[in-house]
Amino acid sequence: MLSADYYLPSYGGKCGSGSGIHPARGDADARRLSLEDEIQMLRSRMEQLFMQENSFTSDNVIAISSLLDLKINEYMRGRHRKRD
């Protein structure tokens, strides 16, 4: 089985956009932007792994896809709360 090395940071949507500065707890817009960045990074990495492994069902692609699903759900929950 081919195994690719990859790094998946887990920010929980609470890290600033590459600045290393953590936004205040009440700063939902900054957290959402950070989560958007994390989603984009995961999506790009998933696409790279797919191209490398030429399979949607490889363990690595599925692992990233699952994490991406969780992050998208987290983002959508945050958007839903903002509208209420």
Image (cartoon, grey):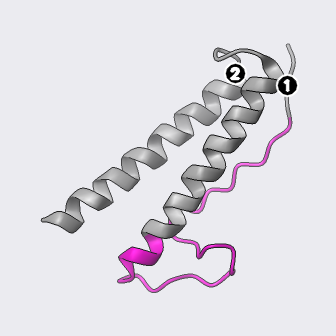
Q: Magenta region, mostly helix, strand or loop?
A: loop
Q: Reading the chain from its start, which is encountered first: label 1 or label 2?
A: 1
Which quarter shows the N terminus?
Answer: top right
Mark linked to residue 3: 1
The amino acid type, in three-letter code, at marker 2 is Asp
- Where 18 falls versus 2 (above or below)? below
Classed neighbour count for the residue bearing mark 1: other residues with Cα under 10 Å, few (<14), some (14–19), many (≥20)? few
Residue 36, image x, y percentages: 51, 59
Mark linked to residue 58: none
Which quarter shows the C terminus?
Answer: bottom left
Residue name at image x 80 percent, y 42 percent: 6
**Hey, which quadrant is residue 46 in on the image?**
top right
The amino acid type, in three-letter code, at marker 1 is Ser
In magenta segment, residue 19: yes
* Image label count: 2
Q: Residues under labels 1 and 2: Cα distance?
A: 8 Å
Residue name at image x 35 percent, y 83 percent: 26
Mark 2 sits on what residue?
A: 59
- Where 3 falls versus 84 (above or below)? above
Residue 41, image x, y percentages: 65, 51
Mark 1 vs 2: CB contact within 8 A: yes
For label 1, the SS is loop
- Where 2 falls versus 9 (above or below)? above
Magenta span of residues: 5-31
Residue nearest the observer in this picture, 67 or 75: 75
- Viewer can see residue 53: yes
